[in-house]
Image (tube, coloured by chain):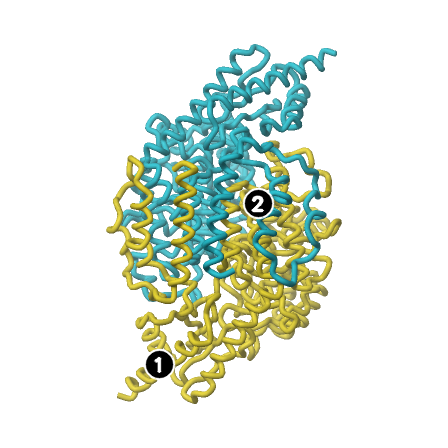
Chain colours: A cyan, B yellow
Amino acid sequence: MNVSEFRRRGKEMVDYVADYLEGIEGRPVYPNVEPGYLRPLIPTEAPQEPEAFEDVINDIEKIIMPGVTHWHSPYFFAYFPTASSYPSMLADMLCGAIGCIGFSWAASPACTELETVMMDWLGKMLQLPEEFLAGKAGEGGGVIQGSASEATLVALLAARTKVTRRLQAASPELSQAAIMEKLVAYFSDQAHSSVERAGLIGGVQMKAIPSDGKFAMRASALQEALEQDKAAGLIPFFVVATLGTTSCCSFDNLLEVGPICKKEDMWLHIDAAYAGSAFICPEFRHLLNGVEFADSFNFNPHKWLLVNFDCSAMWVKKRTDLTGAFKLDPVYLKHSHQDSGLITDYRHWQIPLGRRFRSLKLWFVFRMYGVKGLQAHIRKHVQLAQKFESLVRQDSRFEICAEVTLGLVCFRLKGSNQLNEALLQRINNAKKIHLVPCHLRDKFVLRFAICSRIVESAHVQFAWEHIRELGEDVLRAEKE
Amino acid sequence: MNVSEFRRRGKEMVDYVADYLEGIEGRPVYPNVEPGYLRPLIPTEAPQEPEAFEDVINDIEKIIMPGVTHWHSPYFFAYFPTASSYPSMLADMLCGAIGCIGFSWAASPACTELETVMMDWLGKMLQLPEEFLAGKAGEGGGVIQGSASEATLVALLAARTKVTRRLQAASPELSQAAIMEKLVAYFSDQAHSSVERAGLIGGVQMKAIPSDGKFAMRASALQEALEQDKAAGLIPFFVVATLGTTSCCSFDNLLEVGPICKKEDMWLHIDAAYAGSAFICPEFRHLLNGVEFADSFNFNPHKWLLVNFDCSAMWVKKRTDLTGAFKLDPVYLKHSHQDSGLITDYRHWQIPLGRRFRSLKLWFVFRMYGVKGLQAHIRKHVQLAQKFESLVRQDSRFEICAEVTLGLVCFRLKGSNQLNEALLQRINNAKKIHLVPCHLRDKFVLRFAICSRIVESAHVQFAWEHIRELGEDVLRAEKE
């Protein structure tokens, strides 16, 4: 394909994308395919000769679309939102064309520098403490990671290196293995599975702290675990606090947990993957109070801030904590500016070496929405969640299972788990809307997450009426 | 921005991208900016109100482009290529629009299933042993990772889990920490820094094996290290063999290293990040001989197979080795098909939870180039490297420093390192072409990597004449 064909096909693709998103409401939100559907539809090997673009684009509707779960449909209420916006897609096109691999400043100065400044812009939107910003001479700063899972892992590894060096400085005879055997990290029993996974990868013990009645990690439970572990000779070194848990969007108590971390010299990492975007609204910023106690903070603009995946924003107070954990400098990656102090080589901040020019997405989205436009998006979603909550509350056969703070409503039919499993199955079999469940303690609960950029009050109303009808069917079937 | 503005702006962006790539030869390949150039050019905070698209797009030339290292310029001969092609960019637009997060089969069946089948297509193009393919009921299969660094880390973690379980099955009293303390992994002293980093992250000892005169890891050196370590009570468990090292594109001797790994029950991971793409050509396939001994194999189609970053292709013989190391299954990610045996939940194969619909890029590129088109791309690059090599060999003041097998030529002025450092500095200061150096043993060497999709014989000729002229200047300056 030469450049003139790209001009033509690129414009056709823009129209295909526009048509897809404009018509997404008309597609079934959840696909009607069985595992293994795709393989028989395509050849068993790649073609030897080139095929025409028409054949490829025609196959999208024939082969791909029947198997797509449409995350941007206004009838998609599953998981958490994944962001999508036109400015972000335009930025991604540019990112692909520039196609630089920004592992060091020299590999593309604009890629590194725009990222640093955009992370400062975003940090200011969240009113992060000054220490997290790079500014002109700060010790902290932000980096775009691929996912919150990576951010948690990077924080854990940095904390592990830091505590190991501290202990070895005091007792040089201690081996790394002897230290690692005794390290212990804490997270709420409501934290995302990626937190426990970070511990598995890093080879350190992780302990789940029982959350309270509001599914929050509190001082008392954390303190109790700490005392037990210290008495047993373990070395507490790392705590993950979650703001906006995956199951029910609960918030760990930062103002209680933070001071304990300071006192015990434990690294505090905050995972606000979903909820973090909301903190750009003054009325939700209080949920972030206590961030001043943290060593690292992360949330995903690719969830709720209209920046397409992937773009996970992470800040640290001391960049040398990250670079100290990872820095290896082969000659082919050295460049003349790297010891100037003014520049950043982001490869030392992350797991992979390569990285795309992802800050272009932030730049386009911030400028074309403005802070007010982004705040309006968050507020609309929260209002829709409140509307759904009030609809549920009006029906005495249903119950709300956790406080509704942002865009997620956890609800269920009053009654057994079996009843609610049957309800969920009917909902997802009908394929008019799509939901996923969670467990809150021993209860099977349905999660209703406001997801789509284009979801409106009418879609929520429709979804509720549909759920209520199926609920009635389930209740009737139970009586029979 | 509404959908009709996206139609208009998207088409403008297609033209901007086409203009950029069509005119890339006219831009200076390496930017003329100093660290910190960007921050003063843009506001200190995000705007409150939306800005117009014109303002954003105008700023690309004003603010971004002056700081871009143009990786796709035909005068870019640094690092290794990063792939770029129009079909891949078109696929990426579609990927952004669908915007699904394919962490499980249910989260978007097409995303998972196309990936499995495309990895089979690619595996067949490479003539990988059947065991690496998913097929309809295979135990192996492929997955798209973000980078070769991640693939190495994932392989190391899987190997660590596997050996730990094996040892604990035999001696249940052994703690994980007691085992980890004794684990040791091997890699060539020519391996990429990400290999050593994987060991740092995984908390295991890594030992560099001295490579031979051709910069290859051989049986004797590996065997020697093994015997020493076993005598010292260590547990060898993991070997990374590199096909196409970063410094000079040397090849570890798989046919020697592989049988040792089998005999000693060590996991063999092959990192062919750059060179792997060449194995689709029958004349280069012999370089992969010995892959049958490997447990996992990885290369980057995003380097040399015209698939834009990121797309790192990894295969394993036993998928349960990966999933066994990572599997954690919270309720909100469970779905009704997951125990059917027919489906794949790729989140258990990788570090992050989220993943884009990256297989669309493979599908578009394979179909629109055909295998023959891709082979032609590889062959053209290899021929251009051979041309450059022969130009260098014709000038007795220069020397070739390592065998030229694929698209990389390592060369230098005969003489001191200082002389060659001066030459490189002149080359990169002149900014007509861009190169990076490496060390081979104690020699400072210049790397000339054929990178751009559009590089032609005339560009290589120009580059050589330019280098020769600057070489003369350097030699003259030395004599004065």
Label ID, residue A200: 2
Image coordinates of residue A265 in percent, x first then y, are 40, 41
Q: Residue at x 50, y 20 (%)?
A: A388
Crowdedness of circle 1 by 10 Å Cα count: few (<14), some, many (20+)? some
Q: Secondary structure at mark 1?
A: helix
Q: Residue at x 70, y 68 (%)?
A: B259
- Quadrant of res A380: top left
Q: Secondary structure at mark 2?
A: helix
Q: Does A17 appear above or below A470?
A: below
Q: Does A96 appear above or below B212?
A: above
Q: Is B10 displayed left or right of B275 in the figure?
A: left
Q: Chain of mark 2?
A: A
Q: Are marks 2 and 1 in contact (CB under 8 Å)?
A: no
Image coordinates of residue B91 in percent, x first then y, are 53, 51
Q: Which of the two marks, 2 or 1, is nearer to us in this view? A: 1
Image coordinates of residue A234 in percent, x first then y, are 52, 41
Q: Residue at x 41, y 65 (%)?
A: B73
